[in-house]
Structure formats: structure tokens, C-alpha cells
Image (cartoon, helix red, strand yellow):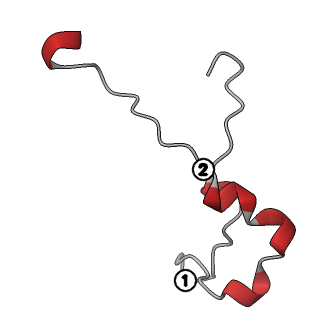
């Protein structure tokens, strides 16, 4: 997070003209799919409970 250069699956997906995401798996090369499988999950909200 220090570099603000995180990998996300949304860097790979392509958007259609109707603003939907193209789910046709045939258009995505295998070389790009690790970004989908290994995408991070970040919580940018303020902590609550024992951490807040």
C-alpha cells in the first residue's frame, strides 16, 4: 500500500459499450488472468470495534 501500486482484477476486465463487464473468458489471455485470481481485497474504511 505504500507504493499505491496494487494489482486488481479490474485492471484486466474489459467494459462493453453498454457499460457492462465482458464476461467472455475467451477474450482474456492466460497471461492476464493471474491478476484476477490473485487480486487483493482491501478495506479502505475506518476501523470499528477493538481497532477503532
The residue shown at (64%, 61%) is 36
- Foreground residue among 28 and 20: 28
Say whether residue 8 is left or right of residue 48. right
Residue 42 point in image, percent of width and height: 46, 36
Query: In this orientation, does residue 30 appear?
Result: yes
- Foreground residue among 43 and 16: 43
Residue 25 point in image, percent of width and height: 68, 85
Q: In the figure, 18 relative to 10: above or below?
A: below
Q: In the figure, 28 relative to 51: above or below?
A: below
Q: In the figure, 4 relative to 25: above or below?
A: above
Residue 28 point in image, percent of width and height: 77, 77
Q: Secondary structure at mark 2?
A: loop
The residue positioned farthest toward the left in the image shown = 49
| Quadrant where the C terminus is found in the figure | top left
Give the Cα distance between marks 2 and 1: 25 Å
- Foreground residue among 36 and 24: 36
| Quadrant where the N terminus is found in the figure | top right
The residue shown at (56%, 43%) is 40
Residue 51 point in image, percent of width and height: 23, 11
Q: Quadrant of residue 32?
A: bottom right
What's the mark number on residue 6?
A: none
Q: Secondary structure at mark 1?
A: loop
The residue shown at (59%, 83%) is 23
- Mark 2 or mark 1: name the one nearer the start of the chain: 1
What's the mark number on residue 39?
A: 2
* Residue matched to label 1: 18
Amino acid at each position: 500500500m505504500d507504493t499505491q501500486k496494487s494489482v486488481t482484477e479490474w485492471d484486466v476486465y474489459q467494459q462493453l459499450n453498454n457499460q457492462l463487464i465482458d464476461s467472455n473468458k475467451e477474450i482474456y489471455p492466460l497471461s492476464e488472468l493471474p491478476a484476477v485470481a490473485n487480486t487483493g481485497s482491501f478495506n479502505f474504511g475506518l476501523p470499528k470495534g477493538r481497532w477503532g
